[in-house]
Amino acid sequence: SQTIHQWPATLVQPVGSPLSLECTVEGTSNPNLYWYRQAAGRGLQLLFYSVGIGQISSEVPQNLSASRPQDRQFILSSKKLLLSDSGFYLCAWRGGPLRNNEQFFGPGTRLTVL
Amino acid sequence: GQQVMQIPQYQHVQEGEDFTTYCNSSTTLSNIQWYKQRPGGHPVFLIQLVKSGEVKKQKRLTFQFGEAKKNSSLHITATQTTDVGTYFCAGLGGSNYKLTFGKGTLLTVNP
């Protein structure tokens, strides 16, 4: 069965510090991978998606970047965090037509920038 | 770009009352999905609707997709405390790769 891992679960970082969040998927190959951010009490904002190794599409211009160095690994990074980067970061992979095209979300990382 | 509007933003009900959340897209959708996010958790897939006018049921939950494939609704009959959470609709439109999520409806249930 497929599983998706994210770490860390919670993170408190000072303004201006770098960020690296990792997401890995098991049990599937060549998945479409996604990074979302959810501000407190708000909806899901798509940040990046990737359809393959080294292929990244950015949805919202900001100080974040993403990379996909391996088929089942998706990394979200920042060189200098802003206060507005606080939020709940969710990684997701997408099942194909046989799985109703549903997105499977990881447990998320709660980031607080102080 | 594609926008998905969802109302209401919040809904508080007494246990046993019904609940409905509505979703409207600015463009025609190829399909629409519904997710539930429990407090402190991550979104979990509930269902996908693909056909115009489609209606699907899951126990007390009824999902509808409009004839024009631009709107959808989720209705819960006789809410229970276990129904508490945020319900999101998400539409798949022009891009086959990305879903556009509504802002969600937070449902709270008073026992």
Image (cartoon, grey):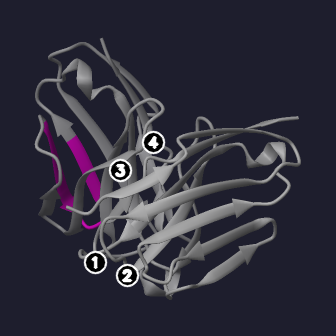
Look at the numbered disc 4 and give the secondary structure of its residue. Answer: loop
Residue type highlighted by circle 2: Ser
Q: Are marks 2 and 1 in contact (CB under 8 Å)?
A: yes
Q: Is residue B71 magenta?
A: no
Judge if badges 2 and 4 mark residues of a common chain: no
Within-10-Å neighbours for mark 1: few <14, some 14–19, many 20+: few
Residue type highlighted by circle 3: Cys
Q: Which residue range is magenta in the image? A: A64-76
In-image side of B47 versus A66 (left or right): right
Q: Nearer the viewer, mark 1 or mark 3?
A: 1
Q: CA distance from mark 3 to mark 4?
A: 9 Å
Q: Are marks 4 and 1 in contact (CB under 8 Å)?
A: no
Quarter-of-image position of residue A80: top left
Within-10-Å neighbours for mark 3: few <14, some 14–19, many 20+: many
Q: CA distance from mark 1 to mark 3?
A: 22 Å
Q: CA distance from mark 4 to mark 1?
A: 24 Å
Check residue B59 in the rendering and tell me which mark sits there, or answer none: none
Q: Is residue A108 above or below residue A46?
A: above
Residue at mark 1: chain: B
Check residue B30 in the rendering and tell me which mark sits there, or answer none: 2
Q: Nearer the viewer, residue B58 or B7?
A: B7
Q: Residue at x 53, y 79 (%)?
A: B49
Look at the numbered disc 2 and give the secondary structure of its residue. Answer: loop
